[in-house]
Amino acid sequence: MSEHEVNQGRRRFLTATTAVVGAAGAGLAAIPFIQSWQPSAKARVVGGPVSFNIAPLEPGQILRGTWRGQTIGILRRDETMLQNLQRVEDRLSDPESLVDQQPAYAQNQSRALNPEYLVLIMICTHLGCIPELVPEVGPQPYDEDWLGGFYCPCHKSKFDLAGRVYKGVPAPINLKIPPYRYIDDRTIEVGADPEQLS
């Protein structure tokens, strides 16, 4: 064989070997790049579900906590509070919670899985202030016929005891309900839907 003749078998072998080694190298180089798209362990913990022990809550009390940097409130309601939800419906902007501010399982009058416990994100839908719980029934400076609810003193937005917004206030929509589930009768986990319970 002269120096100008090419061994085709050897050429195919070298080409195939080079292609395989190049593909393997590209694959190994891509792994750190693809892993960089995944959230860090810290980000996964911050965004993960958070459990709350509701056993100590008495009717009318609220438990506050944090999930994903947002203030969460869990309010235990008594029978009178639940009855008052219907009494204020004609004064509310969205009494049937038609605006998507809650999971489907909380699109009801009590806006809850269990009417006794309201779980909501306590951030006013106007400018992001934290409304105060005012559970007492009776005349208030901002409402002569107050039946209990949440009041935002910054800009005077009002919400009932289901987090539904009153008409004529700066807040445009109801307070948001996060996804949540009951782990047992004493524990609520915010950040996970009931269907995720194993």
Image: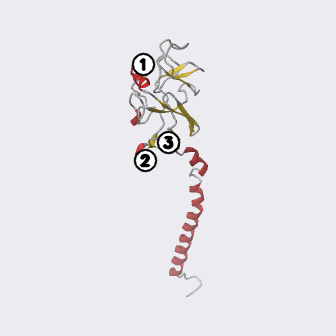
Query: For numbered disc 2, what is the local secondary structure?
Result: helix
Report if the CB atoms under discs 1 and 3 are less than 8 Å apart.
Answer: no
Q: Hey, which quadrant is residue 17 in on the image?
A: bottom right
Q: Position of residue 105 (x, y in %)?
A: 39, 36
Q: Position of residue 89 (x, y in %)?
A: 40, 20
User: Label 3 crowding class (10 Å Cα cut-off): few <14, some 14-19, many 20+?
Assistant: some
Residue drawn 51% across the image and 20% down it: 136
User: Label 2 crowding class (10 Å Cα cut-off): few <14, some 14-19, many 20+?
Assistant: few
Query: For numbered disc 1, what is the local secondary structure?
Result: loop
Query: For numbered disc 3, what is the local secondary structure?
Result: loop
99 to 147, vertically: above or below: below
Marks 1 and 2, the one that precedes in the sequence: 1
In the picture provided, is 112 more to the left or to the right than 125? left
Q: Which residue is mark 2?
A: 196
Q: Which residue is mark 1?
A: 88
Q: Position of residue 143 (x, y in %)?
A: 51, 14
Residue drawn 57% across the image and 86% down it: 2
97 to 47, vertically: above or below: above
Q: Amino acid at mark 1?
A: Val
In the picture provided, is 22 more to the left or to the right than 108? right
Instruction: Name the mark on residue 191.
Output: 3
Residue drawn 52% across the image and 29% down it: 61
